[in-house]
Amino acid sequence: MRENRDANIHPDLQKERDKCTFDPLELTYFLDGGQEKTFEKHAREQFFLTDPELKDTVPNEYLSHKEKYEVAVRKACLIMKKIREFSEQGHGGVDSYRALLGASLGSAVLKDGNPLTLHYVMFIPTLMGQGTVEQQAEWIGRAWTCSIIGTYAQTELGHGTFIRGLETTATYDPDTQEFVLHSPTQTSFKWWPGGLGHTANYCVVVAQLYTKGECHGIHPFIVQLRDEETHEPMPGITIGEIGTKLGMNATNNGFLGFNKVRIPREQMLMKNAQVLEDGTYVKSPSSKLTYGTMIFVRVVLVQDMSVYLSKAVTIAVRYSAVRRQSQPKPDEPEPQILDYVTQQYKLFPNIAKCFVFRMTSEWLWDMYNSVTSELESGDMERLPELHAMSCCLKVLSTSDAAAGVETCRLACGGHGYMACSNLPAMYGLATAACTYEGENTVLLLQAARYLMKAWAQAVATPNELMPTVKYLAKGAKEKDSSVPWKNTIEGLITAAQMVAAGCVKQSYKNIEKRKSAGHSPEDAWNLTSLELVKAADAHCRAFVIEKTLSQIQAKMKGLSAPLCKVLIQLAELYAVDWALNHVGDLLRVFIVISYIISVYI
């Protein structure tokens, strides 16, 4: 094993590192995607983290709200400039953008959010995904060079995840060939877009499209918010910042209202749906094509949550290695708190979750790119599956990461409550993700709609099921779902799938039962919503357990036996942790459950 001794390393920490059964550098290369990627990452960290202009002269906690924003804007602008410099030195630009705008390196420099994040993560991707070739040529170049700064305004004061309920209107005027944007009520004001408060001068606005007296649902429009020279609001625009929050206070979230603001017809993003000069509406091949930006952000979120949890558990494990407490044996020194089983129970499953989310995010990213390519050729067969999986994986990663960061904070006692531990700030970043880009309960219900359709298909035409729900075919065939317990990782995967299939089946039956009793389909759905949420959660956890193992097995070639063993153990630990937290569900499925309890407790 590679020696890694340093006189400045605490002896207790070094003692734990010396127990490692594999080469940590091999794991680093594995996680980074190869030795070259690791060198690139280290060069990037050196380039950005050693710049004195990016270091805090005053701790963020001691700044006013205004000062936090001013520091964040200064740093964000410098970061974008340095990314271009780094690229000119021969280093990859895309990886730098992902690192600096995401949780890995970005949150190290901008600890309370980045006011330019939405410009790169939502504004530009929307132009690329929803704009025509001509619109892309007009806008993307200016956006990429930051000649204009954009954001994405969808959520309103009165409506968030329920985007069909948005109230902002865009009414087409054929006489002038313009859209008239209007906020008819107070609740129709856009609320929450990052960078909107003081930073952005352009915006993609999602509004209800009206033409020839008919509403055609939500569509995206490019709107100038502020003068490019003076930065003053454009006529008819009401704009400002919404105020302080639990965290992410440098993100510069804002509000936006329109008073009959006119924009040219060409500023409706028309890659999918179109409005012709005379006001004729040309329908999109699928209304779901407008969801591309949201799916993209949810994919990115799964990656970021893995990073946030990784940072938190690293802090907590290192603290637990050097912190000594109590004296259970009078004649011996105080033990490291890492030796207490209760501490291990708090931390070790969260280590496993870091790897699980990392593996799953890679699969989701590959699927997103694959489906996006298929959409370009008009193939939308896998879009519903991608939407469902991005919904439930966003929920699982954000909820588990937020809970995991808080568990790590509590595991550090009073020191975890100190701002200098970075755990409180990290919790603010992680828990915010449980709400933005789709409130978690609502997203589980969206995934559940897909599962209800999949169950009906499993009963009628099981051979046509998509890959992530193929296991439902077995559940639909089984008259008696009780099966013998198998004490293997494969057995745990089967267990999770059987639990999920049982939850999906029961939800489907309850909806049909309630409809037969006279309830409307909508009321039957609402009355079954608790079961549906549980079914979506169970489906996602079963998928994560199975996909983590398959991802690890696919990558094992070329890895050393000791590292492969540990990676498999992490997958098993996640699966066992799931089983121990869902014993009640397992009891409903398996004849023998006492065996798992006797073995693993």
Image (cartoon, rainbow, N blue to C red):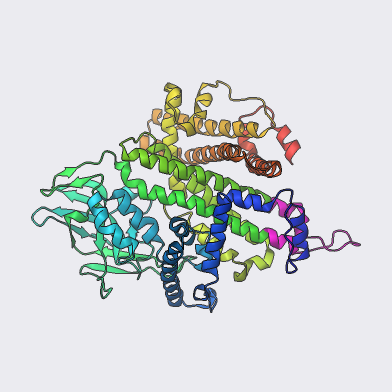
Q: In this view, does 479 lie to the left or right of 484?
A: left
Q: Is residue 413 above or below residue 475?
A: below
Q: What stretch is highlighted in magenta?
A: 317-346
Rendered location of residue 200, percent (x, y) = 33, 66
Examine the structure image and report whether residue 549 is included in the region drawn in magenta. no
Examine the structure image and report whether residue 340 is included in the region drawn in magenta. yes
**Residue 446 in view here:** no
Rendered location of residue 473, percent (x, y) = 50, 25
Look at the image and tell me in which quarter the C terminus lies: top right
How many numbered circles are shown?
Answer: 0
Q: Is residue 137 left or right of residue 301?
A: left
Q: Is residue 149 above or below residue 461?
A: below
Rendered location of residue 509, percent (x, y) = 47, 29
Q: Farthest right residue?
A: 331
| Residue occupying the point 48% across, 62% down | 100
Q: In this view, does 372 lie above or below 457?
A: below
**Residue 494, picture quadrant:** top right
Rendered location of residue 356, percent (x, y) = 58, 45
Nearer to me, 483 or 34: 34
| Residue occupying the point 52% across, 76% down | 52
Q: Is residue 584 left or right of residue 478?
A: right
**Residue 87 in view here:** yes
Q: Is residue 463 left or right of residue 581?
A: left
**Residue 502, picture quadrant:** top right
Q: Is residue 501 above or below residue 203?
A: above
